[in-house]
Image (cartoon, helix red, strand yellow):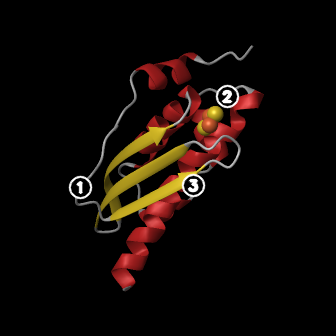
């Protein structure tokens, strides 16, 4: 049986920044090959800083908690700082995830990074 930290439960039950940004500057969608769950991140960027993050996650409780934590960690960071958010640092900030749920943390940082890449591609297009 898996045990979740209080922080995971909090972010699962009260996820921050759920939703969509219709005029997002960048969007990133990733799927988890392990379970087929999906996560989409939307970001707004101003002067190289992430000013807003929203996400939609079709996934398990851990994936929802991870998305919520990633969104909180990313707001206010420069694009370079946000690229340094790792799956491990997200899990650490959540007080750890049960070993059999670590794969769920893979989506969060990846989806954020995909949104940043999308923003950069759009800008250079
Ligand atoms: Fe799919 Fe957790 S079981 S992300």
Residue shown at 42% from the left, 51% from the top: 41
Single out the mark in the foreground, 2 or 1: 1
Find the distance from the CA under tag 1 to the CA under tag 3. 21 Å
Q: How many marks?
A: 3
Ligand 1 resides in the quarter of the picture at top right
Q: Which numbered disc covers residue 97?
A: 2
Dot 3 alpha-carbon crowd within 10 angstroms: few under 14, some 14 to 19, many 20 or more: many
Residue shown at 57% from the left, 55% from the top: 110
In the displayed structure, does residue 67 sit left or right of residue 123? Answer: right
Q: Earlier in the sequence, mark 3 or mark 2?
A: 2
Residue shown at 75% from the left, 13% from the top: 1
Q: Earlier in the sequence, mark 2 or mark 1?
A: 1
Residue at label 3? 110
Q: Earlier in the sequence, mark 1 or mark 3?
A: 1
Q: Are marks 3 and 2 in contact (CB under 8 Å)?
A: no
Q: Identify the element where label 2 is drawn.
A: loop
- Percent coordinates x, y for residue 98 in the rendering: 72, 25
Q: Is residue 92 depicted above or below 109 in this figure?
A: above
Say which quarter of the image contains residue 96.
Answer: top right
Dot 1 alpha-carbon crowd within 10 angstroms: few under 14, some 14 to 19, many 20 or more: few
- Percent coordinates x, y for residue 43 in the rendering: 35, 56
In the displayed structure, does residue 87 sit left or right of residue 6? Answer: right
The residue closer to the viewer here, 114 or 93, is 114
């Amino acid at each position: 049986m898996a045990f979740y930290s209080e922080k995971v439960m909090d972010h699962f039950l009260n996820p921050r920044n759920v939703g969509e940004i219709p005029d997002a500057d960048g969007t990133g969608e990733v799927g988890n090959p392990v379970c087929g769950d999906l996560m989409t991140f939307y970001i707004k960027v101003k002067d190289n800083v992430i000013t807003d993050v929203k996400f939609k996650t079709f996934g398990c409780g851990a994936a929802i908690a991870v998305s919520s934590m990633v969104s909180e960690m990313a707001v206010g960071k420069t694009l370079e700082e946000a690229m340094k958010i790792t799956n491990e640092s997200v899990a650490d900030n959540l007080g750890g995830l049960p070993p059999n749920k670590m794969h769920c943390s893979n989506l969060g940082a990846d989806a954020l990074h995909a949104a940043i890449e999308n923003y950069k591609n759009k800008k250079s297009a």
